[in-house]
Image (cartoon, helix red, strand yellow):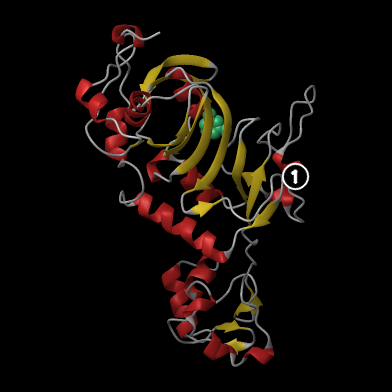
Amino acid sequence: MPRRTSDSEGDPRELCRDKARGPRLQRVLAEAGVAARRVCEQLIEEGRVEVNGAIIDFLPAFADPESDRITVDGRPIKRRSRKLYVMLNKPTRTITSSADEPEFDRRTVLDLVEHPAADRLFPVGRLDYDTTGLLLLTNDGELANRLTHPRFGVTKTYHAVVKGKLTDDDADSIAQGIYLAERKAGQTSGASRTARVAVSIFKRDRDRTVLELKLTEGRNRQVRRMLAAVGHPVKKLERVAMGPVRLTGLPRGAWRELSRKEIEALRRAVRRGKAGAGEGPSPKRRRSRAESAPAGQASIDPDRVRRAVVRTGHEGDRAERRPRRDRGER
Ligand code: URA
């Protein structure tokens, strides 16, 4: 939570020397539209800026834009609207949208978030109607964009229960990439290969397999389509983490605000992704994987099949998948 300032908390000049207070004062001023950062530094050094009634004429100085009273030449700066970050444990039979088509009138995720500022929140990416689990909602467009854009490589972790016994071979195919049709403006426009996925099988028997998948992209119904492509339709799907933030402390259908630590962890995750050193493949690698599918499907390297392991994912060479009928299966 933002640190509130009160007279009892001490000398405002001293408080502004504390890095933990918030961003640098020149940045707060620049973001409020006062002037460019450099000019704001000069304004501070000229003694024209006050924080909670005290002149702050030194650098570095730090301020909390949400709770501090900040003025320039005696005039208050524009207050930035508070950034909100909410985690919802989405139940099934709920759409990830703020409103449904009038003829359907289904429950929406925003119906469940009774936050006083819910009208400013929007979902970060989307979960299917029947997918459960972690959905973030925010009014921070920049962070939302970075969390969902594949360039930033933020991992989304899913737990799935699928029909039938998923083989190591199937898991390896998913890990290496599956060709999925792309749809643009309602039209199918060829197929491209999915980026690598880390797959771990938790449990399997004749009738069902429980597994975890870690993805860095978010194509429409991607997990369901990948699993269906290897012959194992999804029975249940839950998202359990987005980057470093895990679904914790929430019963199904409930929501909470993210802690400051969680918000900072998300910001770090998108910074790492941007630098190309984050989770998942580099942007260049991802681009090279998004080729068009050859006719039919891909084939699988027999060596990889032998080496197939229960945990499989961001390692090893790329292998293409041969159609099942070529391998004498179903
Ligand atoms: N992949 C899917 O298939 N569905 C979701 O809801 C999320 C990821």
Asked if residue 125 can be seen in this view, the reply is no
Residue 48 at what x, y percent from top left?
54, 83
Point out the quarter of the image occupied by ligand 1.
top right
Q: In the image, is residue 8 above or below residue 155?
A: below
Q: In the image, is residue 42 above or below residue 211?
A: below
Secondary structure of the residue carrying tag 1 is helix
Q: In the image, is residue 170 above or below residue 56?
A: above
Q: Quadrant of the N terminus?
A: bottom right
**Residue sitting at the far left:** 303
Frontmost residue, 143 versus 53: 143
Q: Which residue is mark 1?
A: 112
* Amino acid type, residue under disc 1 in the picture: Leu
For the point 31% across and 9% down, which residue is it?
295
On whether ligand 1 comes within 8 Å of the CB at mark 1, the answer is no
Task: Report whether 275 appears left or right of 30.
Answer: left
Residue 315 at what x, y percent from top left?
26, 39
Number of marks: 1
For the point 47% across and 14% down, which residue is it?
188
Frontmost residue, 191 versus 23: 191
For the point 59% across and 54% down, which residue is it?
248
**Residue sitting at the far front:** 205
Residue 216 at what x, y percent from top left?
41, 39
Q: Quadrant of residue 126?
A: top right
Q: Give neighbour class at mark 1: few <14, some 14-19, many 20+ (Cα, 10 Å).
A: some
Residue 175 at what x, y percent from top left?
35, 31
Q: Quadrant of the C terminus?
A: top left
Asked if residue 83 can be seen in this view, the reply is yes
Frontmost residue, 258 versus 329: 329
Q: In the image, is residue 88 above or below residue 103?
A: below
